[in-house]
Image: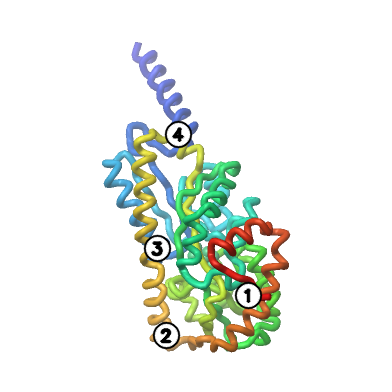
Amino acid sequence: MTHDISRRDAMLAAAAALAATAAGGARAQGGPIVIKFSHVVAPDTPKGNGAQRFKELAEERSKGRVKVEVYPNSQLYKDKEEMEALQLGSVQMLAPSLAKFGPLGVKEYEVFDLPFIFKDQAAFRAVTDGPVGADLFHKLESKGIRGMAYWDNGFHIMSANRPLHHVADFKGLKMRIQSSKVLDAQMRALGAIPQVMAFSELYQALQSGVVDGTEGVPSNFWTQKIYEVQKHMTLSYHGHLAYAVIVNKKFWDGLPEDLRTILDGCVKDATTYANALAASENAMALDKIRASGKTTVYALTPAETDEWKRALMPVHHEMAARVGQPTIDAVYKAAGFVPPK
Ligand code: LMR
């Protein structure tokens, strides 16, 4: 008898495990639904803080039905691996930068990397809050991914061990980039040699001279200590950094409807929170970098900005075949960008 009961228990357990797997989830028997949220930056950044806020809201509002485990700093996976892990269901949530969606086969996301396309954060927000943002999320569905929100992280600056004031200063520099072909074209247009590299490898690569420089945002330069290994930084604000909060679609679709509603609300509120932090955290990080005295921080003059723009505008045209002219036109329109004649 005992034998039969334990066999039945084992069968029930197996069936429950199967059901949990079918939902793509990581539910311990009887325990909360676990959402693993992996990301590559430090906890004390706009994205790190946004992920933490989502965790707090989700656990509180679901009354413990959900447990969110946040894994920062590429602890679980590096850039490319985390995308694969999400698709496989090994993690449930990510917030990769929009410059990392090309390898998934959704090249339209690289529109966000076109140099100088957003004059300010409002212009970026006008794109992601409108039909373009929704349409791009729709394109993820066939990849087994559901887009939940866009998180803003401000504008890129450039760094190297030599001052970068003029386009000619980039000649021959090996520059680390994210995996976007638009960023590749951007660095080539400046005369540099782009090198795709995982974010987690950047500090070492700069320190050892595998690459000479990089672009990035101050909050990442500060928390990854990039200022220790780069003598010069230029406030060029030539590009924009933003993220898409994404979830494994099968996992999401397998959640009870009321829980989906709760979690949607948590993402929405974490988004407001993360977006509000972006400008202030980047400004604070820049102050701390300046105060470190380890690197010079140079602001381009308007004439120098014009020189960079002249060198970089051809990238818009050059990349049209990859990104898609309709997508580019839609973003121009929503962002209020008028390409120079
Ligand atoms: C990078 O790889 O430079 C950024 O995408 C890192 C991040 O997520 O902010």
Name the N-terminal-most of marks 3 and 4: 4
Q: Earlier in the sequence, mark 2 or mark 3?
A: 3
Q: Amino acid at mark 2?
A: Arg
Cβ atoms under marks 1 and 3 closer than 8 Å: no
Residue 151: give its label: none
Q: Secondary structure at mark 4?
A: loop
Secondary structure found at label 1: strand
Mark 4, Cα crowd under 10 Å, few <14 / some 14-19 / many 20+, is some
Residue 60 lies left or right of residue 14; in this view the side is left
Q: Nearer the viewer, residue 136 or 325?
A: 325
User: Within 8 Å of ligand 1, the CB of disc 1?
Assistant: no
Q: Which mark is residue 290?
A: 2
Instruction: Identify the element where label 3 is drawn.
Output: helix
Q: From this view, report whether residue 23 is shown above or below residue 221.
A: above
- Front of the two marks 2 and 3: 3
Q: Amino acid at mark 3?
A: Asn
- Identify the image quadrant of residue 175: bottom right
Residue designated by label 1? 175
Sequence order check: which comes first, mark 4 or mark 1? 1
Graded by Cα atoms within 10 Å as few (under 14), some (14 to 19) or many (20 or more), the crowding at tag 3 reads many
- Percent coordinates x, y for residue 268 in the rendering: 38, 52
Q: Earlier in the sequence, mark 2 or mark 1?
A: 1
Q: Please name whichever residue, 338 or 207, is drawn nearer the observer in this view of the structure.
A: 338
Reading the image, the residue beneath label 4 is 254
- Give the CA distance from mark 4 to mark 1: 42 Å
Q: Which mark is residue 275?
A: 3
Q: Earlier in the sequence, mark 4 or mark 2?
A: 4
Is residue 187 visible to us here? no
The Cα–Cα distance between marks 3 and 4, rounded to whole angstroms, is: 29 Å
